Amino acid sequence: MTTYRDAIAATLSLVLGVAAMAGVMATDLYAQAASAEARGEQALFQTVAPVSRNAASAAQTRLAINEVKE
C-alpha cells in the first residue's frame, strides 16, 4: 500500500515540477535573464579570444598560482 502512495506522490511531484518550470520559462523574466547571460558570455569570449589567438605571448603572461611575478 505504501508503494502505491509513494508512486502517486512521485508522479504528482513530477507533474507539478514540470508545470512550474514551464510557467517560469513562459515569463518575460526568464527571457530577459537568458538574454543577459548570453550577452555576458559573448563579452567574456571577446575578452578571452585575443589572448588565445596569440599563443606565444599568452604563454609568457600565464603564471602558476604559487609563482610571484617580480
Image (cartoon, rainbow, N blue to C red):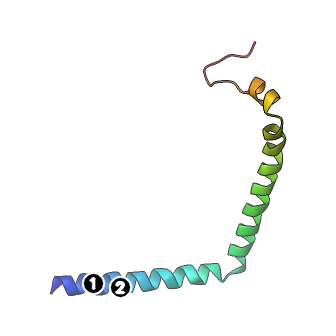
Q: Residue at x 68, y 16 (%)?
A: 68
Q: Amino acid at mark 2?
A: Thr
Local crowd size for mark 1, using a 10 Å CA cut-off: few (<14), some (14–19), many (≥20): few
Q: Residue at x 75, y 62 (%)?
A: 38
Residue 65 % position (x, y): 62, 25
Q: Residue at x 76, y 68 (%)?
A: 35
Q: Amino acid at mark 1?
A: Ala
The secondary element bearing badge 2 is classed as helix
Residue 31 % position (x, y): 72, 74
Above or below, 41 against 49 in this view is: below
* Location of the N terminus (image quadrant): bottom left
* Disc assigned to residue 11: 2
Quarter assignment of residue 3: bottom left
The secondary element bearing badge 1 is classed as helix
Local crowd size for mark 2, using a 10 Å CA cut-off: few (<14), some (14–19), many (≥20): few
Q: Residue furthest left?
A: 1
User: Do the CB atoms of the residues marked 1 and 2 lie less than 8 Å apart?
Assistant: yes
Residue 29 % position (x, y): 70, 75
